[in-house]
Amino acid sequence: MLKRAAELFPGEVVTTAHVRHLDLPLQAGKLAMITLDNGFDHTKPTTFGPGSLAKLAEALDQVEAEAAEGKIVAAAITGKPFIFAVGADLKGVEVLKEHSDALAIGKGGHDVFKRIAALPVPTFAFYNGAAMGGGVEVGLHATYRTVSAGVPAFSLPEVFLGLVPGWGGCTILPNLIGPAKAVKVIIENSMSQNKQLKGKEVFELGIADAIFEPADFLEQSILWAAKVLKGDVTVEREEFDRGKAWDDAVLWGRMVADAKVHGAAPAAYKALDIIAQVKDQDLQAGFDAEDAALADLIMSGELRSGIYAFNLVQRRAKRPFGAPDKSLARPVSKVGVVGAGLMASQLALLFARRMEIPVVLTDIDQERIDKGVGYVHGEIDKLLAKGRIGNDKANKLKGLVSGHLDKAVAFGDADFVIEAVFEEMGVKQNVLAELEAVVSPTTILATNTSSLSVSEMASKLEHPERVVGFHFFNPVAILPLLEIVRAEKTDDGSLATAFAVAKKLKKTAVLTKDAPAFVVNRILTRFMGEIQNIIDEGTSFETVEKAVEPLGLPMSPIALLELVGPAIALHVSETLHGAFPERFTVSENLARVVEARKRGFYIWEDGKQVLDPEVLALLTFGDTALSEEQVRARALDAVAQEIGLMLDEGVVGEAQDIDLCMITGAGWPFHLGGITPYLDREGVSERVNGKRFLAPGLASIPA
């Protein structure tokens, strides 16, 4: 099976499994130590493809023979510096075209990993560095495990990608740490944007039996193993209720999955089915179920979309499409922020934390400036209280952030100044004109506009070539996307500097044309506008909410409207209506909600969300009620049309950039691959535009 799989994947970076022998302390005997290493440093993490599994099998042949001959008393497995192993090589999964080949990958992994548990001597896994997926699972097959306190990332991310932990994770983990904790790791963490565990948490959950500091982790792990073998240390494991408590844990997992994807993605439910099945401790039945689930999911569109999304976020995000040569970027040693409101203060905090250079805020009066600087200092104090930073770092960061009423004093020596003032063209033009008069000739002038034309904003300046759009998404600290907008006259040096700053801010930067509302807001406004039209015409809120559930969005359109704020949503819809009146409408109902200063359509009563009667009294509706299917089709058709037009206009370079924006800026589901793979898979792209957005095989099964 592995031989056949290896033939399908000739480009694999093969992980070798080196065997060396150590004399254990305390005269405990000889240990066979297997080290997983792909020959590269930590920047290219160790993975398992078919060739790598074959290498591990060879190492186990040797260790098995040595154990049988009495030459060793134990075997251990660890990784190269900083990396234990990060699971299956997804590039290999992408090339699979047949169900039988997918099944071979699952069975091949199991056949090799099971041999660790079957060795006639005790086995140890020393989690020395990052461990994910199959990297975690290979260690689960050992008798005992230790973990380094310095492990930065430990997870079973398969459900996040559209798979199940298929090399023992669903079967062994609940039997090791209990179903509730296993559901947290396999389902809840994975579906919470692939949340990672630190070494301490791995130990506290009971996945590892001992934890040691990174400086002498391997030495301490080997000493601990010797003590276990000598009987000086006894590892005790918890017994679990294998009745109602087990069923309740699985039920909780289903509730988490329902809340995240509303049944729209199969991976979580398949993983939970296996966890439910293995409460009787029949490990082989669990392994067989993992094989079947893995093969089915590998041959699904959802998994290919998940891998496509993973590649976008991991690879394309690091090499932004269309960005100028980075050698053109100018150094930035001081940043100015115009405005001291909440958005501006969030930006100031981000610049200070990520770049560790002076950041100065200005506003129209000292009181606002003091409030903005106070907000930043308060957030730094919160980081200190949580132990995220130390006293020295907190004091340094506070010292970097200041405010000044005089723009000339504040920004005279700044290299990069960003405005975050009221979203009105005249106001922004005036601010940029004031800035141009006081900053140096090479200072970049950035605008955090969400929908206005950057070219028009810069049109009255002497040097419009230094103006660039720098659109963040709220909350600034959480959402990774940064839309970098090239205006008509923006030069390559200014643009390159903007991308260099974005990289230091650890943001996912996507280059966009200076088109109305750029990418995310344009697509969301078209989607939300169609939803609002459907409601205004007479379809009930409940029908609309249910209609979009199969998309597995992070929140309903109505909840999103409340998060964004009706006033902002109305402003963006007005901007886009001005640009494209034939496609973007301005809802009279939404305008009434804004005029009444209401935050949204819902209120909470007795712990339930209900329509606000005061808001309902403001609204008028037509008498056209659509079905859920009709609502969904109409909303998706509108989105597909808009994306098609945006690509024709060159708003971004490729459909992949649309998806990267929607995943990192709007939280569009990872398992959908963003938006275009879903529209392709559902046939919407061809129905609306006469063609797919993506080539077959890019986010789907190869032909």
Image: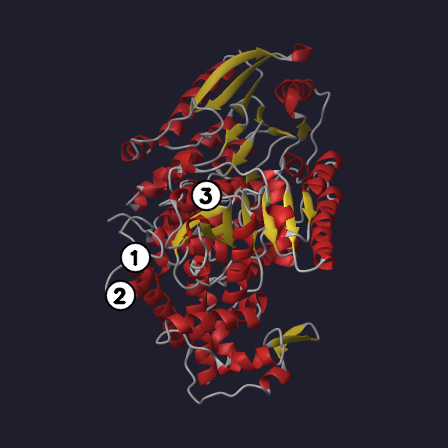
Q: Is residue 674 above or below residue 123?
A: below
Which image quarter holds the N terminus? top left
Secondary element under disc 3, as helix, strand or loop, is helix
Q: Nearer the viewer, residue 432 or 92?
A: 432
- Alpha-carbon span between mark 2 and mark 3: 33 Å
Q: Give residue 655's position: percent from left, percent from top.
A: 34, 54
- Alpha-carbon span between mark 1 and mark 3: 27 Å
* Of callouts 1 and 3, the N-terminal one: 3
Q: Is residue 529 above or below residue 332?
A: below
The type of residue carrying mark 3 is Phe
Q: Is residue 53 left or right of residue 691?
A: right
Q: Is residue 260 left or right of residue 58?
A: right
Q: Which residue is painted at 68% across and 45% down in the image?
A: 401
Task: Name the residue carrying label 3.
Answer: 499
Q: Is residue 15 left or right of residue 181?
A: left
Q: Give residue 42's position: percent from left, percent from top.
A: 49, 27
For disc 3, the neighbor class at 10 Å (few under 14, some 14 to 19, many from 20) is many
Q: Nearer the viewer, residue 623 or 408?
A: 408
Q: Is residue 244 above or below residue 141?
A: below
Disc nearest the viewer among 2 and 3? 3
Labelled pair 2, 3 in contact (Cβ < 8 Å):
no
- Alpha-carbon span between mark 2 and mark 1: 9 Å
For disc 1, the neighbor class at 10 Å (few under 14, some 14 to 19, many from 20) is many
Q: Quadrant of residue 391?
A: top right
Task: Name the residue carrying label 1.
Answer: 693
Q: Which residue is painted at 44% across and 17% down in the image?
A: 62
Q: Give residue 105's position: percent from left, percent from top.
A: 37, 38
Labelled pair 2, 1 in contact (Cβ < 8 Å):
yes
Residue 264 is at least partly visible in this image: no
Q: Is residue 173 above or below residue 588?
A: above
